[in-house]
Image: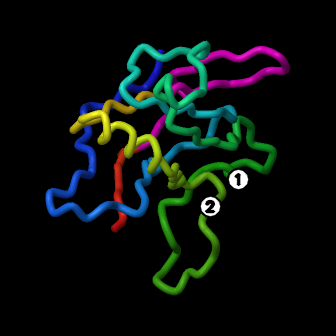
């Protein structure tokens, strides 16, 4: 039902230098379908929509994708162009170009390291809300790469 990453190494410095911040980066996130919340859990591969959004339950944060499921423009309005027309094309990117989403996960990573962990499995639940109901929609979260980046 959810996205589960491979084991990612945690940013542990043998020289004792602590990190100032840790980000979870989702590269090239598609947003051509429904809007959703991506609930992020660490080392909870069986997380569900009922899993509490609390640090003790492995919750590390959320990313929010504003989707564009319909095209309201003329024919071709929502078709991604192959690239800039020329080297001096300074127009803003097309509105459906995949996005970068960054979620700060410093506190969650610190807790894992303090508990002795060396790796983490990232679980993301794409949750769609319709009025009072919520459902996990696994096909919504599409991206090219996941990175755990630390800053000294």
Q: Which residue is pictured at 23% across the width and 43% down the height?
A: 9
Give the residue furthest to the bottom: 88
Q: Position of residue 146 (x, y in %)?
A: 37, 45
Q: Which residue is pictured at 71% across the width and 17% down the height?
A: 134
From the image, tell me which residue sits under label 1: 77
- The reply to whether residue 130 is in sight is yes
136 on left or right of 143: right
Residue 135 part of the magenta segment: yes
Q: Nearer the viewer, residue 25 or 95?
A: 25
Q: Nearer the viewer, residue 19 or 77?
A: 19
| 19 relative to 8, above or below | below
Q: Which residues are magenta?
A: 124-143
Quadrant (top left/top right/bottom left/bottom right) for the C terminus = bottom left
Q: Position of residue 68 (x, y in %)?
A: 70, 41
70 on left or right of 143: right
Q: Give SS at disc 2.
A: loop
122 on left or right of 117: right
Residue 151 occupies quadrant: bottom left
Q: Give SS at disc 1.
A: loop
Q: Which residue is pictured at 46% across the width and 83% down the height?
A: 87
- The reply to whether residue 124 is in sight is no
Give the number of marks: 2
Disc ID at residue 94: 2
120 on left or right of 25: left
């Amino acid at each position: 039902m959810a996205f589960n990453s491979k084991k990612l190494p945690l940013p542990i410095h043998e020289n004792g230098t602590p990190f100032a911040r840790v980000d979870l980066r989702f590269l090239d996130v598609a947003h051509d379908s429904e809007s959703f919340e991506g609930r992020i859990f660490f080392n909870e591969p069986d997380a569900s929509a009922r899993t509490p959004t609390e640090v003790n339950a492995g919750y590390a944060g959320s990313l929010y994708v504003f989707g564009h499921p319909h095209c309201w423009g003329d024919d071709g309005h929502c078709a991604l162009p192959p690239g800039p027309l020329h080297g001096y094309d300074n127009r803003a990117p097309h509105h459906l170009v995949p996005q970068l989403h960054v979620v700060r996960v410093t506190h969650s990573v610190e807790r894992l390291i303090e508990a002795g962990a060396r790796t983490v499995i990232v679980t993301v639940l794409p949750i769609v809300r319709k009025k009072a109901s919520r459902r996990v929609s696994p096909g919504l979260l599409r991206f090219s790469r996941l990175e755990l980046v630390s800053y000294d």
